[in-house]
């Protein structure tokens, strides 16, 4: 059996980091973890190939003629690419198998797909494979149960070309104990976090070979501290020992909740284990908005103080923010700007509220007649008819992006961050003299690209050199971090330029205005 595993194209967005990858000299951030984990569950005697459309791979006729089946795994944002893939397969007469979050709740919108293997593949894929061998494979395989991740195999990394990717990626846990109404994590993976063993995680890390050849290792967890007890007593001590034993240099990144700031011991262990970059969903500084979306972990706390505490502990925070909650008024845009600027969160992604299928928010919007059926999961689009006047939302959202993504404001946030971030937090990192020759060479090439693209030919070169000069004078020990944020002056500026050039929300607003406002919105306005 010939299986062609195809990972669809991710659209250009804040999270695609296209311009950052240019500085790294890489095609994409990290290989498709989920798809290659599924590949490892397929029969060993099947021939398998990977086509990742994000690294320049092309899906050509010869590939489709070779394949008995094309297997696609996708998230919601990859829908446009999926439709193109399925159309090609249909034209070539190649059978298709699909799984992943995109299809879990909306598989009926993809009638040309031959087989759907939904929910967690550890449970549904064996049933499909058994029926396929018998010649009686069904259209849909689904299960309400949750998999035992202790049985999840190592991804089939030999199918991936690591040289094309900037980062390595692993997954420790699935599920989250919180119930944010706009988030589909609990719908997909449950409220009780399931964790792999420490031994599994060490094996996953070692499967990459020389892990230090990557710029970072991403722990693709929706909330790393979903089970704090096991994290603190098993995984983190094992990672600390593994790093020391192998003189590991590469740092880790993950998603986590802001109440990490409440646990000094957990912060210390995570820093010692190598976790440096963390993503936190802050969403909004407005308490009413947090209550409305059931973001309980962000309530009854000073989130600005929490951010500064985490920065001072040695973490570098990337954060997500949302506008368009039913409780938002037009002052929310300036409040978001003030929080982002005061916090020193340099990399801040702002989305318009959307309701993913399967979520509590989606169900409520459907009941209230407020869903817009056709839309892309781009951060600037929504499938909700908002309570706020759509034109006010458009103007405020565009102004918010224009303000926080301006080079001057990125520079100011970087200054704030570097002042809060304590150099003593990284004093145990290997000195430059101890780094491997390959790592030093990679850093040298990246710095050279930064200097050329940002400091010589970049139109924001004045701000780049202003940042470099300030860091040399005030924080020379953090020059590597300052240079990294110099790249984001370029990246975020390009994101905003493309946002305005494409007029994504400007055009999307027409869809919203074309909808007749339901009674629930009229009563809330």
Image: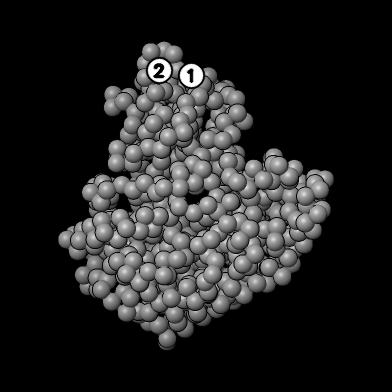
| Residue 191 rendering spot, x and y as whole percentages | 45, 48
Q: Which labelled disc corresponds to residue 131?
A: 2
Q: Where is the N terminus found, in terms of image quarters?
A: top left
Residue at coordinates 45% horizontally, 43% vertically from top-left? 189
Helix, strand or loop at label 2? It is helix
Q: Which labelled disc corresponds to residue 138?
A: 1
Q: Residues within 10 Å of mark 1 (few under 14, many from 20)?
A: some
For this view, does 380 lie left or right of residue 173? right
* Residue 488 in view here: yes
Residue at coordinates 75% horizontally, 43% vertically from top-left? 369
- Count of numbered tags: 2
Among numbered discs 2 and 1, the one appearing first in the sequence = 2
Residue at coordinates 62% horizontally, 75% vertically from top-left? 338
From this view, report whether residue 84 is shown above or below residue 45.
below
* Residue 153 in view here: no
Q: Where is the C terminus found, in terms of image quarters?
A: bottom right
Circles 2, 1 touching at the beta carbon (< 8 Å)? yes
Helix, strand or loop at label 1? It is loop
Which residue reaches farthest bottom? 473
The answer for how far apart the CA atoms under marks 2 and 1 are is 7 Å
| Residue 488 rendering spot, x and y as whole percentages | 51, 66
Q: Quadrant of residue 3?
A: top left
For this view, does 328 lie left or right of residue 473? right
Q: Who is closer to the viewer here, 195 or 380?
A: 195
Q: Who is closer to the viewer here, 407 or 302?
A: 302
Q: What is the basis of the colouring in this image?
A: one colour
Q: Residues within 10 Å of mark 2 (few under 14, many from 20)?
A: few
| Residue 380 rendering spot, x and y as whole percentages | 65, 54
Q: Which labelled disc corresponds to residue 221?
A: none
Q: Who is closer to the viewer here, 35 or 151?
A: 151
């Amino acid at each position: 059996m010939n299986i062609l595993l195809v990972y669809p194209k991710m659209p250009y967005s804040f999270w695609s980091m296209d311009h950052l990858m240019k500085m790294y000299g890489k095609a994409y951030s990290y290989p498709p973890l989920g798809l290659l984990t599924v590949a490892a569950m397929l029969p060993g005697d099947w021939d398998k190939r990977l086509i990742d459309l994000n690294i320049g791979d092309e899906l050509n006729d010869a590939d489709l003629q070779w394949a008995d089946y094309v297997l696609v795994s996708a998230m919601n944002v990859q829908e446009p690419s999926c439709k193109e893939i399925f159309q090609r397969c249909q034209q070539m007469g190649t059978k298709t198998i699909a799984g992943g979050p995109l299809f879990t709740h909306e598989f009926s919108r993809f009638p040309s797909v031959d087989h759907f293997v939904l929910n967690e593949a550890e449970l549904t894929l064996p049933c499909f494979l058994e029926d396929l061998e018998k010649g009686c494979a069904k259209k849909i395989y689904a299960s309400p149960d949750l998999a035992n991740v202790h049985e999840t195999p190592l991804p089939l990394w030999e199918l991936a070309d690591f040289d094309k990717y900037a980062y390595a990626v692993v997954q420790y846990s699935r599920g989250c104990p919180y119930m944010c109404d706009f988030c589909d994590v609990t719908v997909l993976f449950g409220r009780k976090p399931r964790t792999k063993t420490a031994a599994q995680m060490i094996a996953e890390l070692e499967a990459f070979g020389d892990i230090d050849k990557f710029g970072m290792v991403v722990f693709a967890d929706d909330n790393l501290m979903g089970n704090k007890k096991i994290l603190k007593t098993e995984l983190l001590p094992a990672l600390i020992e593994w790093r020391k034993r192998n003189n590991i240099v590469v740092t880790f990144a993950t998603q986590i909740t802001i109440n990490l700031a409440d646990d000094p011991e957990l912060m210390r262990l995570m820093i010692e284990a190598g976790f440096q970059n963390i993503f936190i969903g802050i969403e909004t500084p407005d308490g009413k908005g947090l209550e409305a979306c059931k973001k309980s972990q962000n309530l009854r706390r000073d989130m600005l103080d929490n951010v500064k505490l985490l920065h001072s502990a040695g973490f570098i925070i990337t954060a997500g923010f949302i506008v368009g909650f039913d409780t938002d008024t037009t002052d929310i845009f300036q409040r978001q700007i003030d929080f982002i600027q005061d916090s020193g969160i340099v990399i801040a992604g702002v989305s318009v509220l959307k309701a993913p299928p399967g979520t509590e928010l989606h169900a409520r919007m459907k009941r209230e007649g407020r869903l817009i059926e056709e839309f892309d999961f781009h951060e600037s689009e929504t499938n909700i008819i908002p309570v706020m006047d759509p034109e006010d939302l458009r103007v405020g959202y565009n102004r918010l992006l224009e303000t926080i993504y301006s080079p001057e404001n990125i520079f100011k946030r970087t200054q704030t961050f570097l002042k809060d971030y304590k150099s003593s937090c990284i004093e145990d990192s290997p000195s430059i003299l101890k780094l491997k020759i390959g790592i030093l060479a990679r850093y040298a090439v990246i710095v050279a690209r930064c200097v050329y693209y940002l400091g010589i030919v970049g139109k924001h070169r004045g701000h780049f050199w202003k940042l470099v000069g300030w860091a040399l004078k005030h924080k020379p020990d953090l020059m590597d971090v300052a240079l990294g944020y110099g790249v984001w002056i370029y990246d975020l500026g390009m994101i905003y330029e493309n946002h305005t050039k494409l007029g994504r929300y400007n055009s999307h607003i027409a869809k919203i205005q074309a909808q007749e406002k339901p009674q629930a919105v009229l009563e809330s306005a």
